[in-house]
Image (cartoon, grey):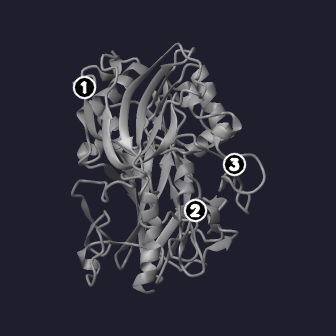
Amino acid sequence: MGAEQIRRWESGALAHAVSDPFGQGPLPWLRGGEHYFDDTGHVVPWYVEPARPGVGSASGPRTADDVRKQIKGFASTGAVAPGEAIDFHITVDPPQQFSVDIYRIGHYGGDGAAHMATSPRLAGIVQPAPLAANRTVSCHHWWLSWRYQVPSYASIGAYVAVLTTVDGYRSHIPFTVRDSHPADLLLLLPDITWQAYNLFPEDGRTGASLYHAWDEEGRLLGEEDAAITVSFDRPYAGAGLPLHVGHAYDFIRWAERYGYDLAYADTRDLHAGRVDPTRYRGLVFPGHDEYWSAPMRRTVELARESGTSLVFLSANTLYWQVDLAPSPSGVPDRLLTCRKRRGPGRPALWREVARPEQQLLGIQYAGRVPEPSPLVVRNAKHWLWEATGAGEGDEIDGLVAGEADRYFPRTALPEHQDRILLAHSPYRDSEGATRHQETSLYRAPSGALVFASGTFAWSPALDRPGHTDPRVQRATANLLDRICKRD
């Protein structure tokens, strides 16, 4: 495939990255120096290193891509409990042996992840080509490659399966190990939004997301020609990690470093009722969480009314309304549909069905932020800013980035006992007009606190190399400590 077509393939990721300057986060996201011996006696670093032209696998693993599909895979489900099994469906081209290493994301003394298990050496095959119908791409017909039995004693959390071929190509599959044990905070990984952005395969021909597709000449098309329905039965594009996954990993590393009591689930668990949010003192939505089903919203609203606090650490949350449906083989919640503004039927924006996101969040989506701008502190005497060193009008550089929310005066607010805006930050939009970002906190009649950061850059400021800010770290701790009722 020629260089021109490769550039088209890469353009899919570039088009999305415009709205998320933090994206997947640094690779490797394990920052330690872990190496181990594989079963051939060679020393293998676990992480992905950038491919270098003309350099073979002896220099370290290389990232698989969607054009050649050296190794790509997906999991049979997004989340499993300890003691359950998770199936991996993997294609390897050319056919050869490969292995799967299981890592758990966490602080781990600054490493960022820990190695938990290794598969035996497995026989890889070239799976059938992805099926595509009306822009919906699915690999539900791929054969089972490996079944991982999660130990009954496994720690709950965010996991990544790292796939590596004998000739040194590597890809990833994220999954969650959840449990219903009591905890202070329930972390919700936004797998529904992750899938909405998934352009697999980014090959200049077949792939489609809810944002993009390609025409017959390999030109990248926009939303009006994108998929209406996307499938979870396919790998994530590129290195196999969701586009916005880094936001969640930033929060997890920081929260586990400081010992917060976390339970884990993904947003499809919330949709399907597999978790009871009222058991927790707070729900944390750590990353970009744009796509919500009606059951998700109803469950979260009921949790707030029961006294469970809500923490939204990104922007453009609860924007599109979606439906989930079973796969062709009947597995629940494997197809994600959002008609957006196309065709007959109800509007897809929550604010267009008289249920604007501000009625839950306290603020709502205002627009993209082309260049990072400072967050301007407001109401600095509030307890959220206590001991941060932030004063009234102080600027936190680069904290308004990606996308921004603000308060809309003509849109109804949620019922509240008290409410405050903790930042009011000017920025320029793509046309040069001055806009404002705002950070919101209110207390519901139940006593629940609802915090919305109103920017993509909040979670990266907790534990992203080059982006951490002690004021944001302390403000977040002030919030979570109050929710968890720590002294």
- Compared with 183, 56 (above or below) is below
Is residue 168 rendered to the left or right of residue 89?
A: left
Asked if residue 317 is positioned above or below residue 331 in the image, the reply reads above
Q: CA distance from mark 1 to mark 3?
A: 42 Å
Cα–Cα gap, marks 1 and 2: 41 Å
The numbered mark, 1 or 2, whose residue comes first in the sequence reads: 2
Which mark identifies residue 323? 3
- Residue 308 horizontal/vertical position (percent): 53, 23
Crowd band around label 2 with a 10 angstrom C-alpha radius: few (<14), some (14–19), many (20+): many
Along the viewing direction, whichever of 389 and 35 lies nearer the viewer: 389
Number of numbered discs visible in the structure rendering? 3
State the residue at coordinates (53%, 30%): 408
Contact? badges 1 and 2 (CB < 8 Å): no
Q: Is residue 453 visible?
A: no
**Viewer-nearest residue: 212 or 236:** 212
Task: Tell me if mark 3 has few (under 14), some (14-19) or many (20+) residues whose alpha carbon lies within 10 angstroms of its own.
Answer: some
Q: Quadrant of residue 463?
A: top left
Q: Residue 425 at x, y = what percent?
A: 36, 34
Q: Identify the secondary structure beneath mark 2.
A: loop
* Whole-percent x, y for residue 23 in the image: 39, 54
The foreground one among 367 and 266 is 367
Q: Return the mark for residue 390.
A: 1
From the top left corner, tell me how far across and down residue 124 is, in percent. 49, 77
Nearer the observer, 228 or 66:
228
| Residue tagged 2 | 209
Q: Amino acid at mark 1?
A: Ala
Looking at the image, the residue that sits furthest to the bottom is 2
What secondary structure is marked by label 1?
loop
Q: Is residue 52 above or below residue 211?
A: below
Residue 438 seen by the camera: yes
User: Relative to 131, is 321 above or below?
Assistant: above
Q: Earlier in the sequence, mark 1 or mark 3?
A: 3
